[in-house]
Amino acid sequence: DETAGEARGDGAQAPARTPATGRYAERFGGQLVLVTGAASGIGRATAFAFAEAGARVIAVDRDAEGAARTAELSLLAGAPEAWSEAVDVSDEQAMEELAAKVHAEHGVVDVLVNNAGIGLSGSFFDTTPEDWRRVLDVNLWGVIHGCRLFGRQMAERGQGGHIVNTASAAAYQPSKALPAYSTSKAAVLMLSECLRAELAGQDIGVTAICPGLVNTNITDTATFVGVDAQEERRRQKRSTRVYGLRNYPPEKVADAILRAVVLNKAMVPVTPEARASYALSRFLPRA
Ligand code: NAD
């Protein structure tokens, strides 16, 4: 489906149907799946992958139009039902309203994917307190709100479920260029592991997904401090194009997400360089 590939808007050549997602139809058919950051990139590809597996999809994003488009295309991809909600994940009250509305209208979410996130590049001393707050508000608080509100509903229902949080290889790969972003993602990784331990007895899995560089729009929306933003954006786009290895499509991350839920993985480094740096990292492997 060429329209779907085009509408992903991430520049990647997206296969509309992948054998991997087709395989998961039995597991996710009819399930209720909520994805945040679903208007673009990894979130949109993840919504499509669950749709292809026959799940009912709720696409959440602060970009109302993009989220609506994802819902529309999810129906074409095979979702029996799909909706969109325009919500800023860092807004506690808006998230509370979303959780109440979803519960009242559709029931308890079976799979929650806390994926909304923003980029921020710049040295530690160029990063202002305001920059820190902005990135932590979205990347960390957005995940906390999602886990608290929807995780509680899952636990109270008592029929299991799964939460996926999009962290990053930056979570375990120190970099002087991304102190705030990396810190937010390291926090998401630890939060995921603590919550996994908490919910283990209730048949609710929690997964932290850690991609390396993926070909999405994140460079366009990222904040660059202490450098010429336009120049830095151009440089990053160039390097994404130049290194074939780095030209990693969001659809493959979506595949990894579905597989991680099926296999109930704690933590998944996704791209080749994310796997390599994880193997070299000082952390012990996570079971
Ligand atoms: P993207 O910019 O294409 O998509 C991010 C989406 O999140 C956008 O639709 C945006 O509108 C939405 N969003 C941002 N802030 C929001 C908020 N406050 N409330 C609701 N929605 C919001 O980028 P992507 O690469 O698909 O990013 C998805 C996730 O993957 C992010 O958490 C990102 O940090 C993570 N990640 C990306 C890469 C990469 O190289 N692209 C690597 C590792 C991790």
Image (tube, rainbow, N blue to C red):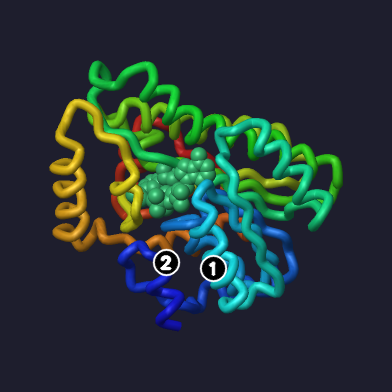
Of 181 and 8, which appears nearest the observer?
8
- Quadrant in which residue 249 is drawn: bottom left
Regarding mark 1 in the picture, which secondary structure is present there? helix
Of 109 and 195, which appears nearest the observer?
109
In the rendered image, residue 61, in percent from the top left (x then y), is placed at 54, 50
Q: Residues within 10 Å of mark 2 (few under 14, many from 20)?
A: many
Residue visible at 62% across and 30% down in the picture: 194
Q: Amino acid at mark 2?
A: Arg
Q: Is residue 144 above or below residue 10?
A: above
Q: In the image, which disc is placed on residue 8? A: 2
Residue visible at 56% across and 40% down in the picture: 88
Residue visible at 44% across and 57% down in the picture: 40
Of 198 and 136, which appears nearest the observer?
136
Image quadrant for the N terminus? bottom left
- Is there any visible trace of residue 218 in the rendered image? yes
In the rendered image, residue 175, in percent from the top left (x then y), is placed at 26, 30
Asked if the residue under mark 1 is in contact with the one under mark 2, i.e. CB atoms within 8 Å, the reply is: yes
Q: Which residue is mark 1?
A: 48
In the rendered image, residue 199, in percent from the top left (x then y), is placed at 73, 38
Q: Amino acid at mark 1?
A: Phe
Label 2 vs label 1, nearer the camera: 2
Q: How many marks?
A: 2
- Quadrant in which residue 207 is drawn: top right
